[in-house]
Amino acid sequence: MPSHSRALRLGVCIVLSCATFGVLSAAFAEGESGANANRESAANASADPKNPGANGDFVVGPDYKIDPDLTDRGNAKGKRFEFAMPLAESKIFKGDDKTLDSRKKVRKERKIFVYVPAAYKDGRKAPILVTLDGPSNLKLVQNAVDNLTASQDAGRKLPAFITISVENGGDDSKGSERGLEYDTMSDRFARFINDEVLPAVLANKEIRAAYPNIAFTDDPWGKAAMGCSSGGAAVLAMGWFRPDLFRRLITYSGTFVDQQDDDAPEEKEYPLGAWEYHSGKKLIENGEKKPLRIFTHVAENDLRANDPEETYHNWVMANRRTAAALAAKGYAYRFIFSKASRHCDGKVFEATLADTLVWMWRGYEAK
C-alpha cells in the first residue's frame, strides 16, 4: 500500500467529499523547460480541476457528468480512416508465438483507425497519440481534438495531434495474443507500433490521397500513447523501455499486476510482470529516472480491489503504489482515484479525458 502519509492525504480528500479534484503533490518531467516547470510549480498552489499544470493526486466522483469538450460542439471536423494489417505479415507479432494458448483465438488481421484533425496542415510533422484496443474511446478523443485545437484558452489548447487507434491481436489475459502484446515487460510492443504501425499509416493510399505530404514528428515528446487495463500496462512499457520513442503516457485502470505469461522469456528478469514497477524489484523507485510524463488512474471498485498483496493482482493497490513511486522519484505525473466506479468505467473517461489530454500535452512545442 502507499505510505501512511500518502494514504492519509487521500483519505482527507475523500472525507471532505471533493467535488472535483484535490491537488496533493507535484513533480516535473525531465526535458521540459525551466519556464514550464516554474509555471507548473505556481499552478500547483491551486486546486482548480481545470488547471492544466496541476500535477499530483486527485479524487473524482461519485457524481459524473460528461465534459462538454468531449461532445460535438460544432467545430470543424477532421477526417477518419480505417484499414487492416494482417498479423501474418508482421515481423514482430505474427500470432504464432509459442507462449500462446491454442484455445485462445488470434485475429487474422487487426484494424487500424486514424483520425486527422481539421487543424492539421498537410506537410507538417504532426505529434501523435496512439490509443490501444481500438477504436475504444476514439470518439471522445475526436471530439476533444476538434474542440480544443480551436480553443481560445491558451492554457487549454491542444496541439493538432493525429490519433492512431490500434486493435489488439485477440482474446485476453495470459496465453492470449492481446496478453502477449500488452502485458509483456519488454520493448517489443513499442517497436511494433514504431516500426510497423506508424509506417503503415503513412503509406496508406487513402490517407495519402487526402494528405499527400503527411508526416509524423521525430520528437519523442510529440509521441503519446493511451490505454486501459492491460492496454495501460502496454503504454507504460512503451515509455519505460523506449523513452526514445514515446514519452507521454496515459493509463486508465492500468494492469500493473502479475499478468505476464508464465512461460514468457521475460519471466527470468521480471518474474512478477508489471508488479515489478512498484513492488518486487521496484523498478520505478530503484531505476534511473526516465524522461516521461505519466497519467495513471484506478477506480474505487477496480479489479480484485480486496485481494491480499501476495496475489500480486490487486489493481487498486498496484496503481496507488505506482503513483507513490512516481511521486517519490520526481516524475511529472497525475493520478486519479475515481469513487463509485469500476474497471475502465466509461463515465470516468467522459468526465476526465479532456482534462487528461490537456495535462498530457502540457509543455509541448512543435519542432
Image (cartoon, grey):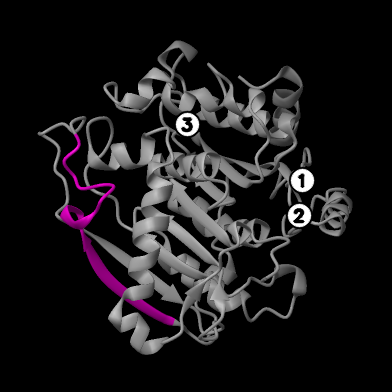
Tell me which residue sits at (61%, 56%) in the image: 356
> What's the mark number on residue 28?
1
**Circle 2 residue:** 32
Using the rendered image of the protein, determine whether residue 347 is visible from the camera's viewpoint. Answer: yes
What's the magenta region?
Answer: 79-97
As shown in the figure, which amino acid type bears the numbered disc 3?
Phe
Q: Residues within 10 Å of mark 1 (few under 14, many from 20)?
A: many
Q: Residues within 10 Å of mark 3 (few under 14, many from 20)?
A: many
Q: Residues within 10 Å of mark 2 (few under 14, many from 20)?
A: some
Q: Are marks 2 and 1 in contact (CB under 8 Å)?
A: yes
Task: Give the image quarter of residue 337.
Answer: top right
Q: Is residue 43 above or below residue 68?
A: above
Coordinates of residue 264 in the picture (x, y in percent): 30, 26
Coordinates of residue 122 in the picture (x, y in percent): 51, 86
Q: Which residue is at the front of the view, 120 or 21?
A: 120
Residue 25 within the segment the image draws in magenta: no
Tell me which residue sits at (60%, 46%) in the image: 295
As shown in the figure, which amino acid type bears the numbered disc 2?
Glu
Task: Give the image quarter of residue 153.
Answer: bottom right
Q: Secondary structure at mark 1?
A: loop
Residue 96 within the segment the image draws in magenta: yes
